[in-house]
Image (cartoon, rainbow, N blue to C red):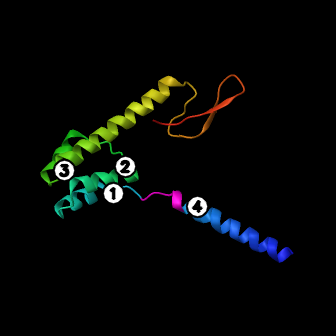
Amino acid sequence: MPMRRLAFLLITIALLGSGCAAVQRRPPPTLEQIVEMSRQGVPAEEIIQQLKESRAVYELSGSQLARMHEHGVPEAVLDHLQQAYINSVRLQERMYHHDRFWMGGCFGCYYYRPWPAPYLVIPY
C-alpha cells in the first residue's frame, strides 16, 4: 500500500511540474533579432505574432525607431512596437488611478480594500 501512495505522489508531482512548464512563454526577441528577422525577409505579420506571443514591450526613442526603419524593419512592426508601449503605459495609468492600493506590475495578485473581501486584478 505505501508503494501505491508513493507512485501516486510521484505521478501527481510530475503532472503538476509539466503543467507549470507549459505556462512559461518564450522570451521576447531583442531589437537586434527583430532587425535580423527583417533582413532575412521574415514577413511583418510573423514578427508581430512573435512579439504578441512573448508580450514584448519596448520603450523606444524616436531615434531608435528611425534607426530600425533605416535597417529595414517594416513600418507595421514599428507601429506595433509603439502601440504595445502605449497600451502598456495606458494600462499602468488606468490601474494606478483606478485603485490607490495598486502597486504596479503584479497582475493577478489579491489586494485588500478596507472591507474584508479581496478582489482579483484582471488586465484588459
- Where does the magenta region start and end? 22-26
* Residue matched to label 2: 56
Confirm whether the magenta stretch covers residue 23: yes
* Amino acid type, mark 4: Gly
**Residue 9 rendering spot, x and y as whole percentages:** 75, 68
| Residue depicted at x 48% and y 23% | 97
Which of the two residues, 60 or 57, is positioned nearer the viewer here? Answer: 57
Residues tagged 4 and 3 counted as in contact (Cβ below 8 A): no
Q: Secondary structure at mark 4?
A: helix
* Amino acid type, mark 3: Met
* Residue matched to label 4: 19
On screen, 116 above or below 31? above
* Residue matched to label 3: 68
* Residue matched to label 1: 29
Residue 29 occupies quadrant? bottom left
The CA distance from mark 2 to mark 1 is 8 Å
Residue 87 occupies quadrant? top left
35 left or right of 18? Answer: left
| Residue depicted at x 19% and y 42% | 63
Mark closer to the chain start, 4 or 3: 4
On screen, 65 above or below 35? above
On screen, 76 above or below 98? below
Which of the two residues, 80 or 3, is positioned nearer the viewer here? Answer: 3
Mark closer to the chain start, 1 or 3: 1
Q: Secondary structure at mark 2?
A: loop
